[in-house]
Each structure stands twice: as structure tokens, then as C-alpha cells.
Image (cartoon, rainbow, N blue to C red):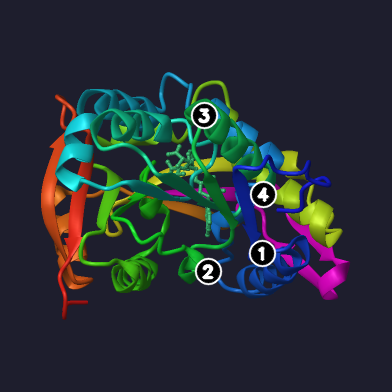
Amino acid sequence: MPAPVPAPAPADVTVDVRLTPTDLRAALRRDARVGLTATPKWMPPVWFYDDRGCALYDQITRLPEYYPFRTEQLLLEEVAEQVVKVAGSEVLVELGSGTSEKTRLLLGAMDRVVGVRGYVAFDVAEATLRSAATAVSQDFGIAVHAIVGDFHEHMAAVPDGGRPRMVAFLGSTIGNLDRDQRRGFLAELQSLLGEDDRFLLATDLVKPVDRLVAAYDDAAGVTGEFNRNLLHVLNRELDADFVPDEFEHVARWNPEGSCIEMRLRSRQPATVALPVLDLAVEFEAGEEMRTEISTKFTPEQVGRELDEAGMAVVDTWTDPAGDYLLTLARPVRGGG
Ligand code: SAH
Ligand code: AVI
């Protein structure tokens, strides 16, 4: 997302910008034209994450209802050393790294067990990425390579450091990809892994619907603000005239897709102008636009999707309640 002029990176931080603010604006125009003229309307979740969206996600992670972040953090506190021992990696690569908060548990464990040689952080949110990279470099005394990019398009920018790498995809962010996107993402990732590289995948597991819905429709309304942030981004970047408060936050379980769907429902009939696209978009009263899916997995499904992509499960770890799963996988040559 467009960021204020960034402060120069410290010596041990390199920043590789594969997605400039101009590229991002072009991609947003493309997505808005496709998604807002489709029936039903939809937008990809990547557009939540401008600076305000990142800050709202950070607030979500502290909400009592939002168990995934806390559960993953507690699980990593428990098993990070085991994960690192089994993986034997010296470099950590993280996709969708955000503030790199839980990453610190993996880096600390690597430091103790094998010695950490470097950290590659990859995210679309430039300002958040830059400040996380600087903080990690200073706190761990390691070189950090930050890549501003879209993991659907720029994964090949991840450097091959010549040492065994562990590519981590935390937060159950893979759940925000639909089945086809997951297929493409996992296949591309597999093709980038060397024989000694490992993939650490975090996934949220299926559980009773009331808990799932509460996690995405919190009492304080933070998730609603996060959802409506998309409209603020469209207003700012495309000069659109959405009235965000006229759109109600909806979080609903979709049993066929095994996912929570977040939607924005127009309270009234509305015509929204997007002059940059020379487009006017009509909403009927009660019309919903899908803004995110958050897939909930079974361990078998995770294993199947990895297998289809040419990866074999090396080990798995779950929390005592069985809410969350960490899977370590290795590439199987000739697979995928
Ligand atoms: N890994 C962190 C953050 C998860 S929030 C955690 O576990 O808490 C999802 C992160 O993925 C955000 O930082 C967002 O900016 C990033 N993200 C979302 N879509 C992306 C994309 N297409 N390419 C790169 N980063 C993306
Ligand atoms: C980043 N991602 C895994 C979060 C999730 O749970 O799907 C984003 C989020 N959406 C609403 N609350 C949190």
C-alpha cells in the first residue's frame, strides 16, 4: 500500500521493492473493475492492509474472541525448538510476515538450536514490513532481507541464500486463499524449495460454528472496522465515494467452502462513483459484497493439499484443544 516516504533502512536491512505504490494502484484499479462489476460483487482481502488495516489487524489479534493468533503464539512458544530441530534450517523466510511478532519465537529457537543466519520477510504492506525488518535486525543482530511484494506474483524474488531455509506461512493466512489460489501458491512454493528447505504452514482447524463466527464478528466491532477499511482504501486510492457506515459487517459460515466469509452489506440502495475508473456501481438495499474468505481445515485436508503440490508432511504439532495445526513439509522431487 502507498506508504509515506520511508526512512532509510539500517545497514543490515535490505529492502527489495517489487511492488511500488504505482504498481499497487494499478492492481487495485484492476481488482476493483473486476470485483465491483461482478455478480455477486467481491474484492480480494489483500486490500485491507494499508497502514490503518495493519493496525486494525493488530488490534484483532488481541481480541478475546479472536483465538487463532493467541493459539498459534502459545503453540509456537511450546514447540518452536522442536520445529527448528526437525527442520534444521539456518535461514527463515516468512510470507505475509506483517509485524513479525510470532516470528520472533522461531528466530529465538533457531538462534538457540542451529544458529540463525538470516531472515527474509515478505509482505505487501511496505511501512509495516520496513519497521518489522528494522526491529528484528536490531533485536537479533541478524541481516534481514525485506521484500515488498504480492505472494501471488513475486514469490520468485525470495533469494536462495545457499543455506537450508525454512519458509514459514503463519497466521493461517493460507485460509484467505481459495482452493485454486492455494493450488497455484503451493505449487509455486514447492518449485522454489531446494531439497534441504522446509515449509512450515500454520492452519486454523474446523471447530464449532459459534466460536468461528464470534472470532470474525467481535463484540467491540474491530473486525467490522477492519472489513470497512477496504472502503476507506477505495475512497482514498480511487477517489470513490463509499459511505463506510452505510455498510454493515457480515461474518457467516459457509459449510461448502469450510470457510468464514466476510461480507459488507449495503444498508440502503446506493450509487457509488469511482471516477478514476469512470465507473458508477449500484448497490441494492441488503446487497452483499464478499471481502474475505477464511478457510478452516482438517489435518487430512492440509496433508492432501501439500501432497497435491508435491510436498510430504515431515511432522505436525497441535495445541492441546486441537484448535490449530502447524505442519512441517519437505519437497518431493518430481512431485507437484
Ligand atoms: N503473519 C502475521 C500476519 C498475518 S495478517 C501473523 O501471523 O499474524 C496477513 C499478512 O499478509 C498482512 O501483513 C498482509 O499485509 C499480508 N498479505 C496479505 N495478502 C498478501 C499478498 N497477496 N502478498 C503479500 N502479503 C500479503
Ligand atoms: C490474516 N488472516 C489469516 C486473518 C484471518 O483470520 O483470516 C485476517 C482476519 N480477518 C478477520 N479477522 C482476521
What quarter of the picture does the C terminus occupy? Answer: bottom left
Which is closer to the viewer, label 3 or label 1? 1
> Which residue has dot 4 on it?
126
Dot 3: few (<14), some (14–19), or many (≥20) neighbours within 10 Å?
many
The local secondary structure at tag 1 comes to: loop
Dot 4: few (<14), some (14–19), or many (≥20) neighbours within 10 Å?
many
Dot 2: few (<14), some (14–19), or many (≥20) neighbours within 10 Å?
some
Residue 224 visible here? no
Q: Is residue 247 left or right of residue 307?
A: right
Residue situated in front as seen by the camera: 170 or 239: 170
Measured from the top left, where is residue 67 in percent x and y?
35, 27
What amino acid is labelled 2 in the image?
His
Residue span colored magenta = 261-286
Query: Which numbered dot is residue 19?
Result: 1
Which is closer to the viewer, label 2 or label 3? 2
The local secondary structure at tag 2 comes to: loop
Measured from the top left, where is residue 164 in percent x and y?
28, 55
Query: Which numbered dot is residue 67?
Result: none
> Which residue has dot 2 on it?
154
Earlier in the chain: of badge 3 and badge 4, it is 3
Q: Is mark 3 within 8 Å of ligand 2?
A: yes
Earlier in the chain: of badge 4 and badge 2, it is 4
